[in-house]
Image (cartoon, grey):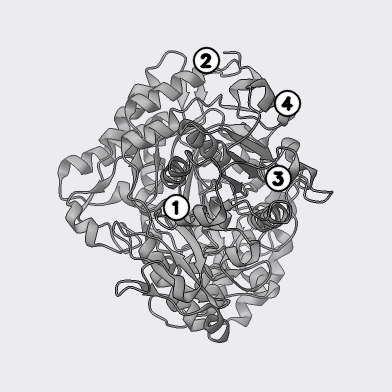
């Protein structure tokens, strides 16, 4: 299908004039390139507001280093400015765990890394307030969501305030933006002009928003059921207060009926309204079925946007994740309750992909934040309404969870039956603990077995990605991940099915070093166990503290937010490297350092297990690499990726290719 320029949301004054518009209701500023696709948050917000009958434009990647002409070029909107800082936290996007600048920005044409500032939420908001001080500025996206209250910033190595304080913006919409943006846009649309006072009066009535107030002007005053956190200033004085605060923040993010949260900062109070209920299937379908072109804006013709290339032939079938991994922000942003699209909506999108001129019949992913949670929910919703557990599957699978894989199998079957589809691969991470759980209903056990076989036989593109994350059960418990023994059991099933079907596929495990609670001895054991399983790991992930996760708060404060017990954390570059090197036990250049470290920590017994034949020769190492790359079952190399503790790049939708 050929698209006209007017099929995209306008990005310039000329494009507005082509639509016959001489004014705009809302102007969105995005730190990503504009890709009109349901996996890119700014496009989703723009289409949702357009669907409300509003005139919306997007200014992608404005230049913040000149005279701010990009911020002025579309003039003053009638209602407000929206700042959508990007599909990833800007600092995760720009820097590695070692705080080194990344070589590529996947959300920028041709991967250029100089088109986005650090903290674009703050930079863009300040620019807009300087030019248009009387126009409301509304923040959204993952950067603002995860910084809605006092948070630890790894890149500045300090606690930072609610982002409204530093940005000067008027309000935040946190989490997935469709429902709050629909309410705010619909309630403001009929006013001829909107002052900041009118804007605030509308936003304060909207769930899933954050604003600052003077203490005596908090709507309704401080109520009995409000959760009042330690102030920002008190958290600066006592790290344990920050840990205590986070437990409340996470629990309220994962409840069906949350309470309002208040935190004092700068002689004001940040008020976090409870979130909207999870979207229904009909609401989610509506969002995905809006008239996206599914293409980058024509202004990027001849350029490649790496993130788009990764997801252009993938389909997101659900939202939310009840895994509750301690280092992950998915539940903090999307919630733990699964919101699933209908089969009809999914098939409609797949059929649209088959009509794309460069589609060759292979879907790269048919998944979500986790591949196998589609349509899973609590059997008794009354129990769910009272629950505040951050995970439905840790420390064990909740007996109230309906872990039925049959609806997902139906989706796979229906997609594969569409003309033009040769293969549908699962690129999202698989929760093998859901597959191995012993359900009371034998039908669910059979469905899990059937799904496992279907996945391995028909939906693996040579390599299946899973995320055991570690081998130490002590560390895994802090991560809220299942015992490593479950990974071993899953690998045995994977190998058996491959052998039965004469397949030569690899299982690719992801691991993290330097996670809170992890010591060098734990990494040494990881090296031994992965060697015994014939894995050779490369370029794996050091733990990166990102705002609003249990792991980050533990790492910063030294206390676990739920128990307030002290937690060891490797923080210095030397401590981190001492853990990381154990991933690479098979490299000759690491051998002497590893042996020295094993003796230092009192584990010389592990030396013989890692090096039973003495010094590994360089030619043996090369042979090992050649053997692994040839596809031998079991061996696997983890290639470099922007795999992050967020596990999700997108502020409003899920781009799931570089993840667990």
Closer to the camera in the image, 116 or 231 = 231
**Element marked by disc 4:** helix
Q: Nearer the viewer, mark 4 or mark 1?
A: 1
Label 4 crowd bin: few (<14), some (14–19), many (20+), radius 10 Å: few
Please, is residue 536 above or below residue 444 in the view? below
**Element marked by disc 1:** helix
**Which residue position holds label 3?**
105
**Which residue position holds label 4?**
14
Disc 2/disc 1 C-alpha distance (Å): 43 Å
Image x and y of residue 646, in percent: 53, 55
Closer to the camera in the image, 413 or 19 = 19
Q: Is residue 341 left or right of residue 600?
A: left
Sequence-first disc among 2 and 1 = 1
Marks 1 and 3 in Cβ contact (< 8 Å): no
Q: Nearer the viewer, mark 4 or mark 3?
A: 4
Sequence-first disc among 1 and 3 = 3
**Which residue position holds label 1?**
202
Label 3 crowd bin: few (<14), some (14–19), many (20+), radius 10 Å: many
Quadrant position of residue 631: top right
What residue do we see at 60% from left, 29% from top? Answer: 9
Closer to the camera in the image, 518 or 312 = 312
Quadrant position of residue 52: top left
Sequence-first disc among 4 and 1 = 4
Q: Is residue 637 visible?
A: no
């Amino acid at each position: 299908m050929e698209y006209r320029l007017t099929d995209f949301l306008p990005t310039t004054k000329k494009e507005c004039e082509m639509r016959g518009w001489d004014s705009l209701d809302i102007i969105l500023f995005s730190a990503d390139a504009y890709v009109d696709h349901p996996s890119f948050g700014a496009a989703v917000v723009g289409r949702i507001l357009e669907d409300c009958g509003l005139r919306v434009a997007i200014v992608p990647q404005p230049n913040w280093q000149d005279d701010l002409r990009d911020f002025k070029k579309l003039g003053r909107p009638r209602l407000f400015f929206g700042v959508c800082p990007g599909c990833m936290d800007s600092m995760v996007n720009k820097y590695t765990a070692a705080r080194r600048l990344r070589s590529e920005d996947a959300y920028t044409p041709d991967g250029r890394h100089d088109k986005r500032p650090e903290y674009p939420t703050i930079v863009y908001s300040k620019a807009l307030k300087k030019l248009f001080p009387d126009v409301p500025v509304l923040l959204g996206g993952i950067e603002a969501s995860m910084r809605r209250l006092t948070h630890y910033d790894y890149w500045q190595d300090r606690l930072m305030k609610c982002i409204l304080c530093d940005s000067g913006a008027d309000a935040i919409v946190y989490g997935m933006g469709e429902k709050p943006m629909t309410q705010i846009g619909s309630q403001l649309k009929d006013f001829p002009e909107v002052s900041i006072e009118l804007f605030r009066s509308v936003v304060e009535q909207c769930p899933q928003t954050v604003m600052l107030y003077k203490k005596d002007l908090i709507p309704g005053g401080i109520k009995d059921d409000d959760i009042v956190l330690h102030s920002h200033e008190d958290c600066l004085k006592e790290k344990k207060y920050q840990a205590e605060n986070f437990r409340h923040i996470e629990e309220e993010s994962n409840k069906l009926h949350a309470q309002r949260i208040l935190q004092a900062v700068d002689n004001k109070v940040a008020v976090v309204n409870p979130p909207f209920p999870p979207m229904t299937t009909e609401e989610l379908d509506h969002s995905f079925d809006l008239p996206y072109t599914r293409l980058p804006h024509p202004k990027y013709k001849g350029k490649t946007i790496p993130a788009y290339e990764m997801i252009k032939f993938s389909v997101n079938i659900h939202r939310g994740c009840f895994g509750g991994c301690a280092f992950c922000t998915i539940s903090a942003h999307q919630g733990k309750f699964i919101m699933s699209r209908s089969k009809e909506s999914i098939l409609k999108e797949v059929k649209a992909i088959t009509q794309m001129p460069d589609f060759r019949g292979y879907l790269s992913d048919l998944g979500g934040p986790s591949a196998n949670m589609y349509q899973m929910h609590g059997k008794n919703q009354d129990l769910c309404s009272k629950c505040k557990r951050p995970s439905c599957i840790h420390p064990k699978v909740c007996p109230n969870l309906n872990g039925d894989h049959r609806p997902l199998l139906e989706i796979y079957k229906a997609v594969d039956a569409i003309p033009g589809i040769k293969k549908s691969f699962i690129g999202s991470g698989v929760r093998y603990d859901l597959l191995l759980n012993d359900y009371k209903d034998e039908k669910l056990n059979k469905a899990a077995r059937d799904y496992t076989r279907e996945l391995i036989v028909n939906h693996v593109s040579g390599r299946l990605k899973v995320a055991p994350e570690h081998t130490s059960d002590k560390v895994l418990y802090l991560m809220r991940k299942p015992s490593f023994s479950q990974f071993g059991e899953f690998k045995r099933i994977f190998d058996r099915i491959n052998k039965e079907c004469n397949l030569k596929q690899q299982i690719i495990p992801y691991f993290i070093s330097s996670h809170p609670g992890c010591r060098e001895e734990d990494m040494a054991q990881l090296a031994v166990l992965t060697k015994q399983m014939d894995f050779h790991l490369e370029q794996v992930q050091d733990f990166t503290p990102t705002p609003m996760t249990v792991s980050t708060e533990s790492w910063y404060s030294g206390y676990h937010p739920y128990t307030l017990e002290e937690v060891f954390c490797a923080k210095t570059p030397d401590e981190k490297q001492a853990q990381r090197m154990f991933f690479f036990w098979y490299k000759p250049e690491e051998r002497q350092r590893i042996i020295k470290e094993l003796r230092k920590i009192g584990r010389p017994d592990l030396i013989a297990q890692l090096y039973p034949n003495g010094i590994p020769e360089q030619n043996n190492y090369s042979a090992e690499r050649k053997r692994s790359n040839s596809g031998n079952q079991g061996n696997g190399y983890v290639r470099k990726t922007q795999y992050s503790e967020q596990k999700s790049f997108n502020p409003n939708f899920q781009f799931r290719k570089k993840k667990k």
